Image: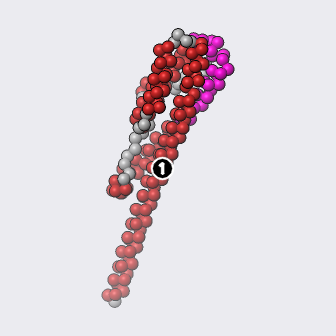
Amino acid sequence: MVPMISTFVLAIVLGIVAVFLFWIVYLYNRMVTLRNRINNAWSQIDVQIRRRYDLIPNLVETVKGYAAHEKQVFQKVTEARASMAAATTVAEQAQAQNQITQALKSLFAVAEAYPQLKANENFMMLQEELSGTESKIAYARQFYNDTVMAFNTLIQSFPARMLAPAFGFTERDYFPMDEAAREPVKVQF
């Protein structure tokens, strides 16, 4: 009878070990999936930011033709665009996005004073493209932050909290928004 009990105990122990290993594999795969979603979401933000980055010079040149004396506004837009290109981390990118948002608000405020500019077909097309891009950036930013929240929640929760450091998973930063930039960019006249 003793060998039968030891076989039964061995089977239970092996079953528990197997369940534990499957659980570890599941948690690891879940963390990898969320990490990859975060990376993908960041790439989507980057694509839209680059699109906006490419639209800005055309928009500035169009406005310059009508409001050449507004050099300070054009300088702010140019500086904000340069900081956007130099940003590498989430925090730097967020700060650069907030700068560009403020600079674009100033640019559109200048455009308000020129009715003939508002009627310009090229300006209207650029304005529409920028508006669409701003919406896409907002959506991509929300998706990124939602994914970061799910990832951070998982790795902070028990029992994943014990495994995450062992596999090199650390908290990710949210894509924050500056308080002054909480108002939407006004692109409709």
| On screen, residue 14 above or below 22 | below
Quadrant of the image for the N terminus? bottom left
Q: Can you give x and y, in whole percent of width and height, for residue 165 in the image?
A: 34, 53
| On screen, residue 55 above or below 74 | below
Q: Residues within 10 Å of mark 1 (few under 14, many from 20)?
A: few
Q: Work out whether residue 82 can be spotted.
A: yes
Q: Quadrant of residue 162?
A: bottom left
Q: Quadrant of residue 176?
A: top left
| On screen, residue 165 above or below 100 | below
Quadrant of the image for the C terminus? top right
Name the residue furthest bottom. Answer: 1
Q: Can you give x and y, in whole percent of width and height, for residue 166 in the image?
A: 34, 56
Residue toward you, 88 or 112: 88
Residue at (43% x, 53% y) in the render: 31
Q: Which residues are magenta?
A: 111-137
Residue underneath mark 1: 36
Taking the image as shown, residue 170 lies to the left or right of residue 126, namely: left
Residue at (45% x, 49% y) in the render: 35
Q: Can you give x and y, in whole percent of width and height, for residue 93 in the image?
A: 44, 34
Q: Quadrant of residue 30?
A: bottom left
Q: Main secondary structure of the magenta part?
A: helix
Taking the image as shown, residue 142 lies to the left or right of residue 159, namely: right
Type of amino acid under label 1: Asn
Q: Is residue 52 magenta?
A: no
Label 1 sits on a secondary structure element that is helix
Q: Is residue 130 magenta?
A: yes
Residue toward you, 107 or 72: 72
Residue toward you, 44 or 11: 44
